[in-house]
Amino acid sequence: MKNSEKNKLNMYGEVLAVMDANSVVYTDTPIVGETLEAFRGKTREIKEIDSNFFSRTKAETMRKEIAEEKLTAGIVKLASALFVLGNKTGNTDLIVNAKLTRTSLEAMRDIELVDKCENILSLVSEHKAELVPYGITDEYLTTVQGIYTEFNSAINDRSDERADSIAAREKLTRLFNEADRMLKNELDPLIEIYFDVNPDFCNAYKAARVIKDTAASHKLAAPSP
């Protein structure tokens, strides 16, 4: 969820809090209660989408980044050993293919990184016995292969979620628009009914309707929709 949407959702929460705290004021006007519950339903749907999809997507992104960092470190170690071996033995294939740095790996796109990792892992398997003096044991190779599998799984899962992400974003935008319309066209005008009889309630409601930028060091008021 975008920061602007989080700020708006916080405003929704403040509106609901004011309305709930003053429910006795509008008990004689059923339409206010009905409108409020419909609005509450919209906010609940928004929270569910954020919790069930966008929070999960954030976790998947973190999973991919962690796997990528570990994989980069592992592949650099393997490639460095291969590069030195190539220079010692005059194996130009190793020299050319294993000349890697952490920076060059980090600059690669996911698919490029996958291809390069497959190439390095294949070369290590071919020269496994020769690499033992370089600290490349079967156990270490198995560890890096496991990290590679985890990274591959993470990027595939993210790819599968792209279509779901588009659908979730469209639904979230629609729900925010519907909630805004309910406030502007229904709840805001209904609250005006009580201005003469309970100005404190109306003023509290209007104060709650101000969107505050909670991410800023100084809270700035933004116009409500």
Image: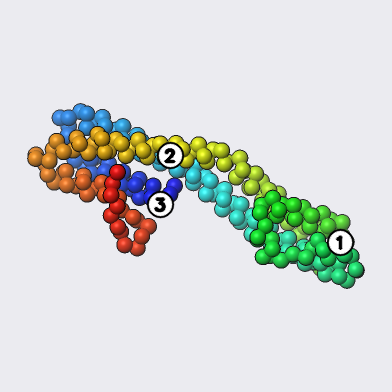
Q: Earlier in the sequence, mark 3 or mark 2?
A: 3
Q: Residue furthest bottom?
A: 88
Q: Is residue 52 left or right of residue 19?
A: right
Q: Earlier in the sequence, mark 1 or mark 2?
A: 1
**Residue carrying label 2:** 172
**What secondary structure is marked by label 1?**
helix
Q: Within 10 angstroms of label 3, few (less than 14), some, or many (20 or more) residues?
A: few
Image position, residue 79 (x, y; %): 77, 63
Q: Find the distance from the CA under tag 1 to the CA under tag 2.
A: 52 Å
Q: At x 44% / y 36%, what residue is drawn?
A: 171
Give the image quarter of residue 92. Answer: bottom right
Q: At x 24% / y 47%, what residue is drawn?
A: 208
The amino acid type of the residue labelled 1 equals Asp
Q: Find the distance from the CA under tag 3 to the CA under tag 1.
A: 50 Å
Q: Is residue 17 left or right of residue 169?
A: left
Front position in the image: 97 or 194: 97
Q: Mark 1 touching mark 2, by CB under 8 A?
A: no
Q: Within 10 angstroms of label 2, few (less than 14), some, or many (20 or more) residues?
A: many
The amino acid type of the residue labelled 2 equals Leu
Image position, residue 132 (x, y; %): 84, 65
**Residue carrying label 1:** 93
**What secondary structure is marked by label 3?**
helix
The amino acid type of the residue labelled 3 equals Asn
Q: Find the distance from the CA under tag 3 to the CA under tag 2.
A: 14 Å
Q: At x 26% / y 38%, what residue is drawn?
A: 184
Q: Within 10 angstroms of label 1, few (less than 14), some, or many (20 or more) residues?
A: few
**Residue carrying label 3:** 3
Q: Earlier in the sequence, mark 3 or mark 1?
A: 3
